[in-house]
Image (spheres, coloured by chain):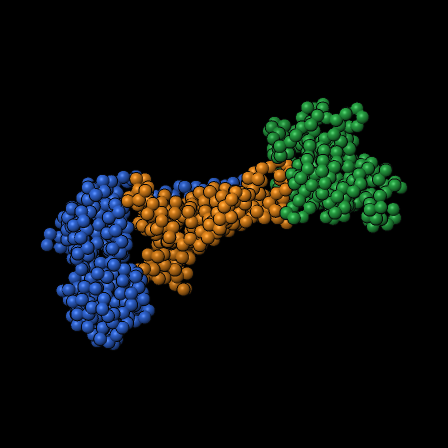
Amino acid sequence: MNAPLPVSLAPAADAAAAAEPLVSLHGAAVHFGRTTALAGVDLTLRRGQRLALIGSNGSGKTTLLRLLHGLLPPSRGQRTLHRLAAEGRPPRMAMLFQRPFLMQLSVQRNLRLGLWLAGVPAAERAARSDEALHRVGLHDQAQRPAAALSGGQQQRLALARAWALRPDILFLDEPTASLDPAAKHEVESLVETLGRDGVTVVMSTHNLGQAKRLATHVAYLEAGRLVVQAPTDAFFGSTLPPAAAHFLRGENPWL
Amino acid sequence: MADSLALALQLITQADAQLLGIVALSLRVSLSACAVGALAGLALGAWLAVARFPGHQLLVWAVNTLLALPSVVVGLLVYLLLSRSGPLGSWGILFTPTAMVIAQSILVVPLIAALSRRLVADALAQGGDQLRSLGAGPLTAALLMLLHERLAVLTVLLTAFGRAVAEVGAVMIVGGNIAGVTRVMTTAIALETSKGDLPLALALGIVLLGVVGVIHGVIALLPMRDRGLREALA
Amino acid sequence: MALNPLTRRAAVALLALAGVAGPPAAHAQDRFIVMASTTSTEQSGLFGHLLPAFRQATGIDVRVVAVGTGQALDTARRGDADVLFVHDTAAEEKFVAEGFATKRQNVMYNDFVLVGPKADPAQVKGNDIAAALKKLAAGGRPFISRGDKSGTHAAELRLWKAAGIDMAAARPAGYQECGCGMGPALNIGSSSNAYVLTDRGTWLSFKNRGDLAILVEGDRTLFNQYGVMAVNPAKHPHVKAALAQQFVDWIVSPAGQAAITGFKIGGEQLFFANAGR
């Protein structure tokens, strides 16, 4: 249900040396008509990573996110979903968007709908939805219409909806871009908690401070190309490639 | 005009059995037609919003064109179908309320389909991706959008009901305007007009609008009592 | 979506109103026949008087579909009616010749009258319809014809022919066809002060007279004969032949004929029973 495409399940790579790979892209490109949104990307997402995608608008962050998730098929190249060694199944995915789409229903119903769409049996739905609501601190709002929630609360609800699915990978597309600082902080700490609990996170963001705080790895995109990918410390250290350096200073002159 | 208003009030307060029967039949036929039309029309509209087979644009064009189907033409087509000399003659339902429901259903399906297709397509443009990321297939997403936009869907159904209850061409031909059996408000108005009793015809028209007005009023007031919905609307 | 209790109750009430208001006389389900008749007979109120008497006598409900004579005959040809009650003897005889009915019988007659503006600019008042029509044609006076292949329309055309005016060759100036029923034609006539040929029954119950009044009546050629026919089961096996025959038998019987004679508007008799004559 998460991956509508035929999926090739390659065996997990050497698990001892590096964390097991979950999704690999080889020379993957995405074209929309004549426009190239993403050109020839090679990337392997590994378990336990918290990957931040940074770049200006139109650089291909959203497209890369959707490609990794499986919402979009590659126009060229390959996307490989690897079987999880321990669980013996492909990884489960969930995605959060900048402005979450919530149905005109109560908070609780929205959650349960998400579980229903994922094929979770009725008996479990109530329990998992309650658990998720408690986790994000929205349990007292369960009966309220989702539309009545504040921006930050709505994003937390979306997080709860994603979390209730027990995903192995959580994708987030600029999840805090439209939130005020307080709400931003709430969502960030939840993402951090999820990461610590073992969920692999891929997040696109404008906010370099956020990337620095939350990510283990960073990837920089420019005009549809994946220019640089490195562990966070290395990325924000002194050895910045010139192209990335230019962007970073533009965004944060004090770097 | 003032005579008609007074006459209308008189008709309503007297609540003559014959008039009540005519009003009840109008409502019964048109509400049934809208129920049938809703099932078929909403399904068709949702499907058209997500369908991508070759020729689906042609189908959309056809549905939109059928919005202008004159009610008398629908009546004629259904008459030819249900006539004893027609393909479905053995059903024996010509000149009965059932035939009238069939004709009015055909009349409202394009309306409901065209409008619901638009509102589903617009809603999917907003949140279709997210529903897909949650695992919804295209048709499931379309149907969920009907649930999501249920107030807009209600307006579509009210529009369809208005079209049905106000039409006279179809029910006149397939019903025959038989007193006590297939006479509805609009055919009664047509009859009184052709008899030259214009004040009565107008009065009946006022009564028709009054009845529909009451229905709409009730529907409009209900959400006000439901605090949750009012919060959501605020 | 949760329906709060009030919404739920309202929905149930609406559905109940829709479902419960079933067709009246549901108990008389099968004992009914469909009669194709003309708008003039229905609108005069004759059926409101006649049919209850018939139901009283036989327990049979008659469902009247009132359209123009041409359409009524057509309806019967298609097998959608069990019995016919129209006023166009020539067309009825053709119907019998085609085999759709085994025979036609006289039931009653009424008469046509020529109505027009009280001031009567064409000076047609009297009891000679042929002379009146000649004057209308010569003077190019406004005249409203039904033009709808009804019995009335057929009679009107016969009268013009008898007056020596050939409609096919040249329409008199002022002659207009509305393709409509008697009531609407009178509506047009009353609003444009024109002359109209109408049956007395419709005229007596017509309320929107404006400035019109009866100008020509009593001419023998203005008499309008009504006939009744049961649709032939040989052509349409499904028709309720036995019930239809009961109606035919009753309407020409003394009881039916008396009911016709007893129908009056404002003390005036509209239809004159003449079965068997």
Figure quadrant of residue C264: bottom left
Residue C260 is at least partly visible in this image: no
Q: Colour of chain C?
A: blue
Q: Colour of chain B?
A: orange
- Residue C165 in the figure: left or right of residue A236: left
Residue C17, given in percent of the width and then of the height, sits at 42, 44
Which of the two residues, B137 or C126, is positioned nearer the viewer here? B137
The residue drawn where x is 62% and y is 32% is A6
- Residue A123 in the figure: left or right of residue B184: right
Work out whether B148 lies above or below A6: below
Residue C231, given in percent of the width and then of the height, sits at 20, 46
The residue drawn where x is 77% and y is 25% is A15
The N terminus of chain B appears in which quarter of the rendering? bottom left
The residue drawn where x is 65% and y is 43% is A101
Work out whether B219 lies above or below C267: above
Chain letter, colour green: A
Query: How many numbered badges does the structure rendering display?
Result: 0
Residue C42, given in percent of the width and then of the height, sits at 26, 55
Residue B85, given in percent of the width and then of the height, sits at 28, 44
Which of the two residues, A53 or A192, is positioned nearer the viewer here? A53
Residue C8 is at least partly visible in this image: yes
